[in-house]
Image (cartoon, grey):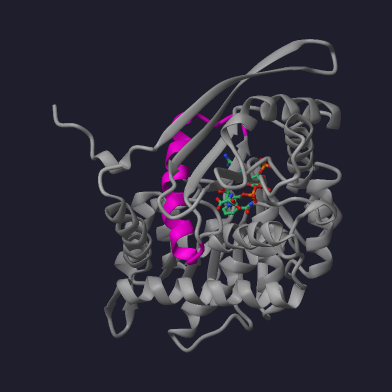
Amino acid sequence: MADPPPDAEPDRVVSFRVVWEDDNNNIRVQRGWRVQNNNAIGPYKGGIRFHPSVTESVLKFLAFEQTFKNALTGLPMGGGKGGANFNPKGKSDNEVMRFCQSFMTELFRHIGADVDVPAGDIGVGGREIGYMFGQYKRITNQFTGVLTGKGLEYGGSLIRTEATGYGAVYFLENMLKTRGQDLAGKRALISGSGNVATHAAEKVTQLGGKVLTLSDSEGFIHDPEGITQEKIDWVKAHKTKRRGRISEYADEYTGATYHAGKRPWGVECDVALPCATQNELLGEDARALVGNGCMAVSEGANMPTDLDGVHVFKEAQILFAPGKAANAGGVAVSGLEMSQNSARMSWKEAELQQLLKDIMDGIHERASAYGRVSDSYIDYVKGANIAGFKKVADAMLAYGVV
Ligand code: NDP
Ligand code: 2IT
């Protein structure tokens, strides 16, 4: 049998045992991984995911995608991804802290500010980054920019929390502009209710759009009156402070309905932003969206649309932004956090807001340059893949056989 294509293989996969003690004094064991996919253009860079569905295979696809996403940002970052099959749901703060500390006790020897710089992803937010950074600092006695998404008090960057969701909406705006449109008055479907979804909702609302849905792994809420900033703030607090479920939104706001076990894609809309997880928008969902007149889809999540769905969007020639282009704002501001840490400085919010916008414009330009099919259609999937790949491939060729 022929060898597999050599460059689809990650540089390195580290797999380790994570042992921790729960509040009932049971000894628990999880598996942790870090996939270091490619460091041709910079240190490995990418998030850490804590979710029971995490496997080595999932992290390999995420690290592969991350490599080309990071190249697209124009910043010097390689690609990686890590995580564990740990379920933070229902765990106490102390349990999460003990797990994070144990995870870092294994991971610390494989990462470093110039080696590999993890960040958050599903199930890993400010709380988890704090516990992991604290443990890294304790073990190594070094205060370096080894993680991004840190708290503002200890080397974090303004705008990092908002960057992924905001960036996905900036990309959506750029796509709409190619058809002489903007977000004003547009009805938006958003899935998820975590970091990416709530900040995407916030930016859509700020730009005059009306967000109709949010979801979690158990169902979605439909609010025909629109999910306003006040309601978004409630969802943020509900998910991060109270660790609640999205179903409770319909108890709080009585104009809204909750649909258990369903995804939002059947609701009539103008634009859609899948912001929860991979494979959450299938062919049949894509057909429903196109059938209802949806004109643009911007992926806040990584690979939320399955291959069948991608084909439906391409055939209909609607505006479709793959995650590696649309959600790159998060890792881009992580790159800016690394720069600030190296310079031991903190940049101002207005400056970072502008940089995020400029970076998203740059990604749109690069993806358009390689993706233009005709005067009226840009294939952003093709464009983003080629633009991201070319930079990494050119760097690898420059190194010779290494
Ligand atoms: P969060 O943990 O903050 O939120 C995840 C959301 O997605 C929750 O609402 C969660 O619901 C839902 N979700 C998770 N797993 C599933 C599932 N199997 N089926 C349905 N819903 C699910 O994560 P983020 O917002 O950070 O991440 C969301 C997506 O965005 C992921 O694909 C991530 O890789 C991607 N991304 C994140 C970036 C970041 O900066 N955070 C950057 C770029 C991409 P529940 O509460 O029920 O689990
Ligand atoms: O998928 C992603 O781009 C992220 N989870 C963010 C990675 C990062 O290093 O900020």
In the current view of this chain or complex, which residue is farthest to the top?
Answer: 26
Q: Which residues are magenta?
A: 51-75
**Quadrant assignment, res 8:** top left
The quarter of the picture where the N terminus appears is: top left
In the current view of this chain or complex, which residue is farthest to the left?
Answer: 1
Would you say 329 lies left or right of 385 here? Answer: right
Of residue 252 and residue 198, the one placed in the foreground of this image is 198
Where residue 341 appears, as percent x and y from the top left, is: 70, 57
Q: Residue at x 65, y 40 (%)?
A: 218
Where is 29 relative to 95, above or below? above
Q: Residue at x 68, y 40 (%)?
A: 123
Where residue 313 appears, as percent x and y from the top left, is: 37, 64
Q: Residue at x 38, y 61 (%)?
A: 388
The answer to whether any part of residue 293 appears in the image is no
Q: Residue at x 70, y 14 (%)?
A: 28
In the current view of this chain or complex, which residue is farthest to the bottom?
Answer: 180
- How many numbered marks are there? 0
